[in-house]
Image (tube, rainbow, N blue to C red):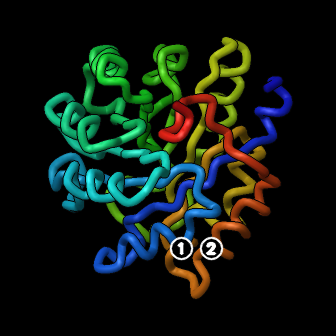
């Protein structure tokens, strides 16, 4: 795949945070045809105020799905749990640069066979995570403050997306920029123009009457066909 072709590809990442947890398998299957990554928001009640799910739910999803399980760890001590997520069937994990020990965490994810992602809060400057761009597969630039669904998109993050995209290109780094927070067919094109290629959406997909069509609409809004995923996938062998 050439660089120009890859630059046109996008990944749609439905977030199960907005799905019906009593019907999770049904909801995941409902959007499977438009799912490149299945986004799993993990919150510990400490790094962020809310408390959500952990490795047992990831293991349950893996038993019923071959989807790429994209786990966003909004937790204070990810080193203590990365092994459990890998064992549960996570495909990749994103840890927050704000928790520190970033290089060690990236190394731990590599050792566990996980794709390595780095998540960044809206207020965190580019300079904090820039040194790690050549070591990761995905950089998740939050476009809301993490911890709550349904927040409004923060346009002030757009320049950071553009600067990150420029740094990845100039450095020859293959990492994909993912955005999460207030992403819908109106906001997603703005992030795509800045350089994002993976789009997390919760309420904009699962909050609609037809989640599959909502995911397709999101894909069309960013002009995407196929997945911006230069990393592995459970079905790739």
Do the numbered discs 2 and 1 sit on residues whose CB atoms are within 8 Å?
A: yes
Out of 235 and 47, give the one closest to the viewer: 235
Asked if residue 89 lies left or right of residue 143, the reply is left
Classify 103 as above or below 158: above
Residue positioned 51% across, 80% down in the render: 207
Out of 71 and 67, give the one closest to the viewer: 67
Classify 12 as above or below 228: below
User: Where is residue 79 shown, x and y percent of the image?
Assistant: 19, 28
Q: Crowding at label 1, few (<14), some or many (≥20) Cα neighbours within 10 Å?
A: some
Tell me which label, 2 or 1, sits earlier in the chain: 1
Classify 60 as above or below 112: below
Corner quadrant of residue 124: top left
Camera-side mark, 2 or 1: 1
Asked if residue 11 lies left or right of residue 189, the reply is left
Residue positioned 73% across, 41% down in the render: 194
Measured in 3D between alpha carbons, the distance from the residue under mark 2 to the one under mark 1, in whole angstroms, is: 6 Å
Can residue 92 be seen here? The reply is yes
User: Where is residue 11 shown, x and y percent of the image?
Assistant: 64, 48
Give the residue furthest to the front. Answer: 237
Q: Crowding at label 2, few (<14), some or many (≥20) Cα neighbours within 10 Å?
A: many
Helix, strand or loop for disc 2: helix
User: Where is residue 198 shown, x and y percent of the image?
Assistant: 61, 46
| Label number found at residue 212 | 2
Out of 176 and 124, give the one closest to the viewer: 176
| Label number found at residue 60 | none
Can residue 155 be seen here? The reply is no
Residue positioned 61% across, 83% down in the render: 210
Asked if residue 80 lies left or right of residue 153, the reply is left
- Mark 1 — residue? 30
């Amino acid at each position: 795949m050439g660089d120009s072709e890859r630059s046109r590809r996008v990944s749609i990442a439905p977030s199960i945070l907005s799905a019906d947890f009593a019907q999770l398998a049904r909801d995941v299957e409902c959007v499977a045809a438009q799912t490149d990554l299945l986004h799993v928001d993990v919150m510990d009640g400490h790094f962020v105020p809310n408390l959500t799910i952990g490795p047992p739910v990831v293991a349950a999803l893996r038993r019923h799905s071959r989807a790429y399980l994209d786990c966003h760890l909004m937790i204070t001590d990810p080193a203590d749990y990365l092994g459990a997520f890998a064992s549960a069937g996570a495909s990749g994990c994103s840890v927050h640069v704000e928790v520190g020990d970033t290089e060690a965490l990236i190394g731990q994810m590599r050792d566990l066979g996980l794709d390595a992602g780095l998540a960044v809060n809206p207020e965190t400057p580019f300079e904090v995570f820039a040194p790690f761009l050549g070591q990761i597969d995905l950089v998740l630039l939050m476009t809301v403050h993490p911890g709550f669904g349904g927040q409004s998109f923060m346009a002030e993050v757009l320049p950071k997306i553009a600067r990150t995209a420029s740094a990845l290109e100039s450095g020859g780094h293959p990492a994909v920029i993912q955005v999460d927070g207030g992403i819908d067919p109106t906001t997603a094109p703005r992030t795509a123009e800045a350089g994002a290629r993976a789009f997390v959406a919760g309420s904009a997909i699962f909050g609609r009457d037809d989640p599959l069509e909502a995911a397709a609409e999101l894909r069309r809004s960013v002009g995407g066909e196929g997945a911006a995923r230069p990393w592995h996938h459970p079905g790739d062998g």
